[in-house]
Amino acid sequence: MKILVTGAGGFLGWHICQHLGRSGHTIAAVGRFSGDAAIGGRYPGLELLAGMTLPDPAFERAVKSFRPDVLVHCAGTAQVADSVKRPYLDFQRSVDVCAYVLEALHQNAPAAQFVLLSSASLYGNPEHLPVAESARCAPLSPYGYHKWLCELVVEEYRTLFGMRTAILRIFSAYGRGLRRQVVYDLCEKMINAQGPVRVFGTGAESRDFIHASDVAQAVACVAAGASGIYNVGSGTETSVADLVRFLADQLHCDKEIVFTNEQLPGYPTNWRADISHLETLGFRPAVSLRQGLADYCRWFQPVRASAA
């Protein structure tokens, strides 16, 4: 297929382009490219549309000329904390951009399928675990609300204009290239902190960690023509305390670990995804957390060394 990926210079966008490209699809990668994405390697069928910050008239021309079969929308914000500090900017860079991309596709390639990378953040603190797609949406942050609004705009275009759409609610994604969020922050502290490693919370908080290559696999599953909303996680709940132990072991960190008992605004307490709906499409997580963290730490240490 011909697949256009927005946000292709970002963490998940880069992994998705690599996975789909290796599968033989023709990829038009839209985004700002630097660091890991820039060295991800070219391959037959990859076209880099670099330097594009949406909205951009060049994007509309690219959609019209490329005529994708599928558009995977990875562009947008990815930081809960930043959304709390600057909610309107987060709205502009997420909801506005999502609506713009949908309209560009509607006008220039209306038969294409639109795949949105959304977030489990819109669940907030679920009433029951594992959380299914039918659970009540109760976001705790502007980021979560804006992902929910993006989903509503996708539903608008599906209902009113007959667009083919699929939504992926991503849980806690990690992997090579990740330079934010809890896995990255813990690695930074374990290597660079002077004195004890201070970790927010009690350690009993939990997440459902999903490797970026498995997120890419999920995109491939729905891009075969699926519709609807799908959770993308491992289906396994991991406490922050266990995550800390795994990383300390991989990084050979013997520093004291201190849990602050402070809760960061906008973040949920416990997560575990019900992935049975996605499994009906043949999805099976392939990377265990231990495997994924070991690989991440191998990548992280040379990156930190070169940055120093």
Image (spheres, rainbow, N blue to C red):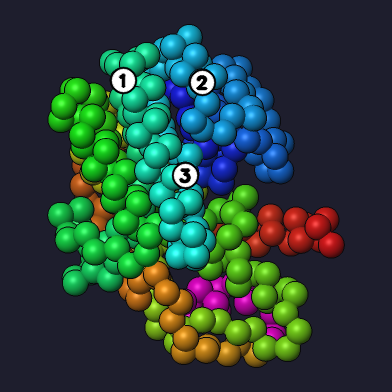
Name which residue type carries label 3.
Arg
Structural crowding at the residue carrying mark 1, measured as other residues with C-alpha within 10 Å and reported as few (<14), some (14–19) or many (≥20): some
Q: Position of residue 208 (x, y in %)?
A: 38, 64
State the image quarter where residue 295 is shown: bottom right
Structural crowding at the residue carrying mark 3, measured as other residues with C-alpha within 10 Å and reported as few (<14), some (14–19) or many (≥20): some
Q: Position of residue 211 (x, y in %)?
A: 48, 53
Q: Nearer the viewer, residue 100 or 290?
A: 100
Q: What is the quadrant of the C terminus in the image?
A: bottom right
Mark 2 or mark 3: name the one nearer the start of the chain. 2
Q: Which residue is mark 2?
A: 57
Mark 1 or mark 3: name the one nearer the start of the chain. 3
Q: Which residue is mark 3?
A: 93
Magenta residues, as a range? 239-255
Q: Is residue 73 magenta?
A: no
Secondary structure type for disc 2: helix
Q: Position of residue 174 (x, y in %)?
A: 52, 56
Q: Is residue 252 magenta?
A: yes
Mark 2 or mark 1: name the one nearer the start of the chain. 2
- Judge from the rendering whether residue 190 lies leftward or rightward of residue 288; answer left or right: right
Residue shown at the point (45%, 77%) measured from the top left: 264
CA separation, marks 2 and 1?
15 Å
Q: What is the quadrant of the N terminus in the image?
A: top left
Residue shown at the point (61%, 24%) measured from the top left: 48
Q: Which residue is mark 1?
A: 106
Quick check: marks 2 and 1 in contact, CB under 8 Å? no
Compared to 200, does 118 lie above or below? above
Name which residue type carries label 2.
Pro
Q: Position of residue 53 (x, y in %)?
A: 57, 33
Secondary structure type for disc 1: helix
The residue mark sitting in front, 2 or 1, is 2
Which residue, as the protein is rendered here, is positioned at the far top?
Answer: 65
Number of disc labels: 3
